[in-house]
Image (cartoon, grey):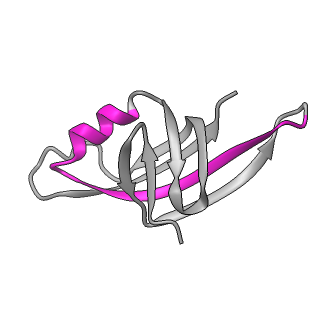
Amino acid sequence: MVKKVILNGVEIQVEEYEEEVVHQPNGEPLHKIRFAFKVRSDEYHDITTLLYQQTFDVSVPERDLNFRGTIQNYSTSVTNLYKKNQVGDFRLELIESI
């Protein structure tokens, strides 16, 4: 099972992970991954600042998978983790950039 995903050099500990290959209309295959992770209030600013970049160098070491990816879908259970000792559930879906 995948335990971490690295985005632009930032390691994220994941709780759920899925990957698939999708095909463009021309048949070219693209990697697509979905994962869920927890964000604590003390990490919130750094993680959201990272996610605002929208496109990343993606690495999944346990799968020997590396690609340039863009956010296709993103959700969180909370919109403000600035209150101390809170934890939010984040879900992120990335697709390989052409």
**82 relative to 46 in the view: left or right:** left
Measured from the top left, where is residue 74 in percent x and y? 48, 43
Residue 79: quadrant of the picture: top left
Residue occupying the far bottom of the picture: 1
* Residue pictured at 71% horizontal, 55% vertical: 20
Residue 47: quadrant of the picture: top left
Residue occupying the far right of the picture: 26
**3 relative to 93 in the view: left or right:** left
* Residue pictured at 42% horizontal, 36% vertical: 8
* Residue pictured at 41% horizontal, 27% vertical: 53
* Residue pictured at 11% horizontal, 49% vertical: 83
Quadrant in which the C terminus appears: top right
Magenta range is: 27-51
Q: How many labels, in total?
A: 0
Measured from the top left, where is residue 64 in percent x and y? 60, 56
Instruction: Give 92 or 12, whichever is nearer the viewer.
Output: 12
The reply to whether the magenta stretch includes residue 40 is: yes
Quadrant in which the N terminus appears: bottom right
Measured from the top left, where is residue 50 in percent x and y? 35, 34
- 8 versus 19 height, above or below: above
Residue 87: quadrant of the picture: bottom left
Measured from the top left, where is residue 73 in percent x and y? 55, 41
The reply to whether the magenta stretch includes residue 49 is: yes
